Image (cartoon, rainbow, N blue to C red):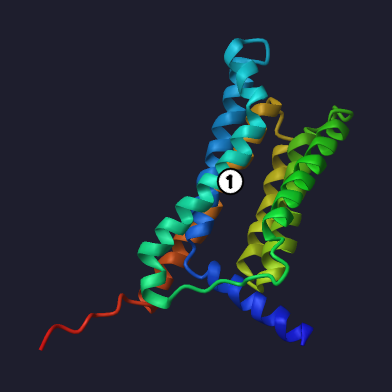
Amino acid sequence: MKDETSQIEQRVKRYWYSDGIGEMMGGIMFFLLAVYFSLQQYLGDESFIGGMLQAGFVVLLIGGVFVARRVVNIVKARITYPRTGYVEYRTYNGNAVWMRILAALTAMTVASISIMVARRFDSIDSMVAVTGVLVAVILMVKQAWTSGLGRFYFLGAASLVFGGILSVSGFARGYNLGLFYALMGTAFVISGGLTLKSYLRENPMPVEAGDE
């Protein structure tokens, strides 16, 4: 029974990613992070705007996730659900929201610890290297493993490659992070765009029967 439930949950998650809309929105979020870190590096922490950017990072991250989720649902309501229907996996204990909050807090804690560890290494930009590893782990475990979609393994591998190359690029840390998120955003938009194109081709909008 447990295996059957896991398979159902995996199918629902595969369906959620079947149109590529979530990936494209994720790519837009990556582009916003690219602009954020590049601006912070350009302006510096001592400037007023740079200080405001640094103080508002958590608000930007959490707020961006909620807004992106809402936008994805709106777009799916116009494109996906009229074609292949609405499917949702409901957990029996009703703790899905708290689990998401816990996951977000865990991710922020891991990221903060990684930043502190990264600052102890000066030979390479370990910040972008650690970021590449963290993003790859999230993509390969949370996305690829739970949904069974192979393209997330490729995106995870791209994260490792981008992080590794940029860690020895010699650019300033903020610009490295900006380049990393810009490259990942491009990869996500391309992956999501190709997936959406395939989805629309395979699932045309149903033609409503006219009144006789």
- Answer whether residue 189 is visible to the viewer in this image: no
Q: Position of residue 140 (x, y in %)?
A: 72, 62
Quadrant in the rendering for residue 29: top right
Residue situated furthest left in the rendering: 212
Quadrant in the rendering for residue 182: top right
Viewer-nearest residue: 117 or 59: 59
From the viewer's perspective, tell me whether residue 128 is left or right of residue 38.
right
List the residue tagged with mark 1: 65
Instruction: Tell me the residue at 24%/80% (across/down).
Output: 207
Instruction: Tell me the residue at 79%/47% (across/down).
Output: 106
Instruction: Tell me the residue at 49%/63% (across/down).
Output: 20
Q: Residues within 10 Å of mark 1 (few under 14, many from 20)?
A: some
Quadrant in the rendering for residue 59: top right
Viewer-nearest residue: 40 or 72: 72
Query: Judging from the image, what secondary structure is the residue with disc 1 in?
Result: helix
Q: Is residue 197 above or below residue 44?
A: below
From the viewer's perspective, tell me whether residue 159 is left or right of residue 68.
right
Which quarter of the rendered picture does the N terminus lie within? Answer: bottom right
Q: Position of residue 181 (x, y in %)?
A: 61, 41
Q: Is residue 202 above or below residue 122?
A: below
Which quarter of the rendered picture does the C terminus lie within? Answer: bottom left
Q: Amino acid at mark 1?
A: Val
- Answer whether residue 173 is visible to the viewer in this image: yes
Viewer-nearest residue: 166 or 95: 95
